[in-house]
Amino acid sequence: MSLDDRKSAILRAVVQQYIETAQPVGSGTVARRHDVAVSPATVRSEMHDLETEGYLVQPHTSAGRVPTEKGYRYFVDSIGGAGPLDPTNVAKVSEFFAAAHGELEQLLGQTSHLLSTLTDSAAVVTGTEAADATIRSVQLVDLSPTLFMAVAVTSAGSVMKHTFEVEGEAAAAELQDAGELLSATLVGSSLSAVGSLAVVSDRPGAALAARTLEAVARGVQAERDLLYVDGTSRIANVFDARETVESVLTVLEKQFVVVGLLKEIVDSGLTVAIGSETGVEPLAQCSVVVAPYRSDSGATGAIAVLGPTRMDYAGTVSAVAAVSERLSRLLTEGQER
């Protein structure tokens, strides 16, 4: 159901006031806002209609009203997409990406911290190593005479590590030989093909190289999905109920849930998922603002901010959109221009 201009203005005023104060909003407060030019009595009548239509609800202990999920959805849809960032955040984003470099994991981790700082909320960055990404280099590191670490660097800049043990000690010559065989077998191969590769040789390091190859294959399988979360401590500051805080934090610890959630939101075409729209019951009091990013290697992912339903939607949508755009530009062009 569409709203007329007056109801729309009053609803937006209630949502904005509640976002700012976290307190139920009364008609007098709304009437005093510069964007609502009607009397308190008229506001009271219109707010009653908005409650009847499901946009507002009146808590039992208050004469004021708060937005429902439907009310927030109307407000978010009325924003009309990402607006410009404020100058302070523009400077932070520009400074970050001007200095950004290094491995993909490091970049994504730092990006989650940037986004959390910009929005004062929990921030999530996910990534999926592209199936057609290739192994750029591989190393075999001896941590002890029987414990080794396989380290593979991909063409997308990801570093995959996996430790494994062997029976008996490996001689230095065997270790060097295994490293050479690994490079010859793996470098240039796509990640999707790693599991089907084999070390075919009768050289001294062949057995150790084969074990390392198995470890790399396990590492690739386990680490294709990348997840970085920052700002979880901010969650405790925005929810009154300890149970809510704990349930939200539990969700953020489940990589497959978070990665799947952001993918579903992006695939559905949403920029903002509010409450039950996330499809995750513990996030019923949360909203997620998300945007995808891309890279020239084919690896893709999403960045997102998770906060209470009364989050600053306009500022958060703008921050997520700006960071997504700059991250995509960096990963596709290789440098900021």
Image (spheres, helix red, strand yellow):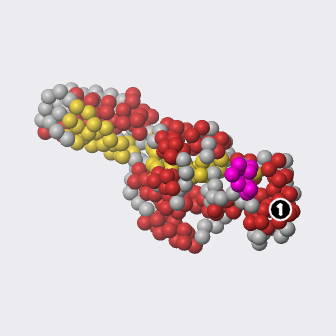
Please, what is the three-letter code of the amino acid marked with disc 1?
Val
Residue 329 location (% of width, % of height): 54, 59
Residue 88 sits in quarter = bottom right
35 relative to 103, above or below: below
Decide whether residue 62 is among the magenta residues. yes
Which residue was labeled with disc 1?
Answer: 43
**Which residue is depicted at the point 52% across and 71% down?**
91
312 relative to 105, above or below: below
| Residue placed most toward the observer, 162 or 287 | 287
**Which residue is depicted at the point 66% across and 42% down?**
277
Q: Which residues are magenta?
A: 57-67
Residue 147 location (% of width, % of height): 20, 35
Decide whether residue 94 is among the magenta residues. no
165 lies left or right of 14: left
Residue 22 location (% of width, % of height): 63, 58
- By secondary structure, the bulk of the magenta-drawn segment is best described as loop
Q: Would residue 318 be seen by someone viewing this image from the given angle? A: no
**Which residue is depicted at the point 83% across and 59% down?**
44
**Which residue is depicted at the point 55% across and 51% down?**
240
